[in-house]
Image (tube, rainbow, N blue to C red):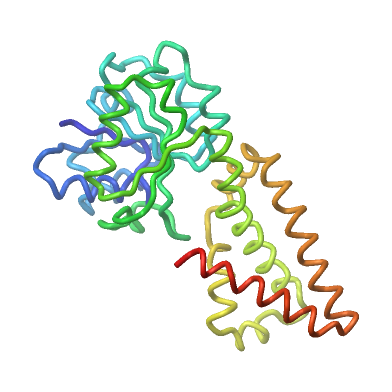
């Protein structure tokens, strides 16, 4: 089976590496960044780097580019076969779903692999990124059974756990568990950087700060696009978080130490669910 990947960074490159472990797939790729194309080929992420036209001539085409880029590229396809399965890997879904041209809707599968790191680019890709991680498949009723089965099979090949929901629910949920944490991490990093002597503060940093600020290393361009596409859900989650943070602030300001401890104990229960 011939696999095409548009976008050869962490997400697309890791798919290429994993699928190339099997003799069942030939993987070709395209990236508009010349350096990325070179790095992807030299590091074995793809069997071949091809043009934008040629990458469309495949059985399965992955769109592993930023969410605004996915919407833009949908207008540029002119070499797709009717039986090509198109799978986008964007972090938001509703706006992408609305932008899919009617003539390719049945062959398009909306997917979001819940996997990644704070790193980006071809050199950050690695085999096994997707193993045992969840992939969300959205609005499957609008895709044909043939293309849905193809998508499910390829993600199973990547050893992912499949879950299904509509695109609106997906965007609401990911605002909480992905998009809000990134905004918090960027805000925490900015708060420290705006102090009089941030280096002396960071000299004391240990695991807690490093864990919470890790996401602030993520691509600003990518997260700008995600924030724009999921604006309403993200604003709701930020507002709720602000209320919760204000409640903690109030307990500390008013020396309500028992109340503060109760809040912390309630938060501890989250990890009972995550077990």
| Residue that protrudes farthest toward the top in the picture | 103
For residue 51, which quarter of the picture?
top left
| The N terminus - image quarter | top left
Q: As rendered, which of 2 and 233 lies closer to the eye?
A: 233
* Image label count: 0
- Expressed as whole percent of the image width and height from the top left, the position of residue 216 reads 58, 63
For residue 83, which quarter of the picture?
top left
- Expressed as whole percent of the image width and height from the top left, the position of residue 265 reads 66, 77
Vertical placement of 73 versus 44: above or below? above
Vertical placement of 219 versus 76: above or below? below
Q: Is residue 211 left or right of residue 20?
A: right
Q: Is residue 102 left or right of residue 259?
A: left
At 76% across and 64% down in the image, what residue appears? Answer: 244
Q: As rendered, which of 157 and 2 lies closer to the eye?
A: 157
- Expressed as whole percent of the image width and height from the top left, the position of residue 29 reads 28, 37
For residue 245, which quarter of the picture?
bottom right
At 70% across and 66% down in the image, what residue appears? Answer: 190
Vertical placement of 245 versus 53: above or below? below
Q: Is residue 236 left or right of residue 180?
A: right
- Expressed as whole percent of the image width and height from the top left, the position of residue 220 reads 58, 52
| Residue that protrudes farthest toward the right in the picture | 254
Q: As rendered, which of 32 and 167 lies closer to the eye?
A: 167
| The C terminus - image quarter | bottom left
At 45% across and 33% down in the image, what residue appears? Answer: 138
Q: Is residue 63 left or right of residue 94?
A: left
At 34% across and 19% down in the image, what residue appears? Answer: 144
């Amino acid at each position: 089976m011939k696999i095409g990947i548009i976008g050869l960074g962490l997400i697309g490159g890791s798919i290429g590496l994993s699928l190339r472990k099997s003799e069942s797939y030939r993987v070709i790729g395209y990236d508009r960044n010349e350096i990325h194309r070179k790095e992807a080929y030299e590091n074995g992420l793809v069997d071949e780097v091809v043009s934008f036209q040629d990458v469309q001539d495949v059985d399965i085409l992955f769109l592993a580019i930023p969410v605004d880029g996915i919407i833009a590229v949908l207008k540029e396809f002119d070499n797709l076969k009717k039986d090509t399965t198109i799978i986008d890997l964007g972090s938001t879904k509703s706006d992408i779903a609305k932008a899919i041209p009617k003539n390719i809707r049945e062959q398009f599968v909306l997917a979001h692999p819940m996997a990644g790191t704070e790193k980006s680019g071809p050199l950050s890709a690695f085999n096994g990124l997707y193993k045992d991680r969840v992939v969300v498949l959205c609005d499957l009723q609008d895709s044909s059974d043939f293309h849905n089965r193809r998508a499910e099979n390829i993600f199973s090949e990547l050893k992912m756990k499949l879950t299904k929901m509509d695109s609106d629910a997906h965007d609401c949920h990911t605002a909480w568990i992905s998009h809000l944490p990134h905004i918090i991490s960027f805000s925490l990093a900015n708060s420290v950087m705006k102090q009089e002597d941030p280096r002396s503060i960071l000299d004391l940093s240990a695991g807690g700060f490093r864990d919470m600020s890790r996401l602030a290393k993520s691509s600003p361009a990518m997260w700008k696009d995600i924030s724009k596409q999921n604006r309403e859900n993200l604003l709701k989650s930020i507002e709720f978080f602000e209320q919760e943070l204000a409640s903690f602030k109030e307990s500390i300001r008013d020396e309500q130490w028992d109340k503060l401890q109760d809040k912390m104990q309630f938060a501890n229960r989250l990890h009972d669910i995550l077990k």
